[in-house]
Image: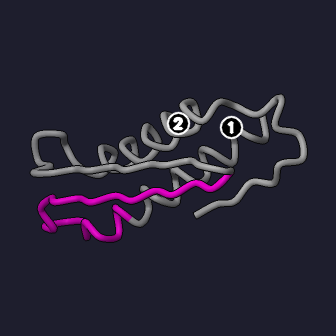
Amino acid sequence: MTERDGADRSSDPSDDEVVRTAAEAAEGVVFSHYRQSAVTDLDVTVTFEDGVLDVDVYLNAPDDEVDPEAVAEEAVAAAGDAVDDLFDA
């Protein structure tokens, strides 16, 4: 979870843009590790309310080469980083 201060929200991205950016970043990490056809189930849930970002990634994929839980954690971190970059731009 990431919290934003409300100092200058006039130039901040919209909530929809924040959610979309976080979701795309999380999915990008997952699909950088797995072919789309190898992923049995992927659920990326992103909320951004009152300056608080919450990202949850559920991944059901083969653990032959990469641990799906580690990939999901990396995806959550990437989502937060992408949103940080969005606010820093």
Between 36 and 80, the one lying in front of the other is 80
Q: Which residue is mark 1?
A: 86
Question: Residue 2, position in %: x, y?
Answer: 64, 60
The residue at 62%/45% (across/down) is: 83
Residue 22 numbered tag = none
Tell me how far mark 2 sits from mark 1, CA to CA.
8 Å
Residue 54 highlighted magenta (yes or no): yes
> Type of residue at label 2?
Thr
Question: Residue 14, position in %: x, y?
Answer: 64, 30
Please give the range of residues in magenta.
51-72
Between 1 and 64, the one lying in front of the other is 1
Residue 58 highlighted magenta (yes or no): yes
Q: Element type at marker 1?
A: helix
Between 79 and 28, the one lying in front of the other is 79
Q: Element type at marker 2?
A: helix
The residue at 41%/66% (across/down) is: 73
Q: Residues within 10 Å of mark 2 (few under 14, many from 20)?
A: some
The residue at 49%/49% (across/down) is: 47
Q: Earlier in the sequence, mark 2 or mark 1?
A: 2
Quadrant occupied by the N terminus? bottom right
Q: Are marks 2 and 1 in contact (CB under 8 Å)?
A: yes
Q: Is residue 8 rendered to the left or right of residue 32?
A: right
Q: Is residue 24 rendered to the left or right of residue 35?
A: right
Q: Which residue is mark 2?
A: 21
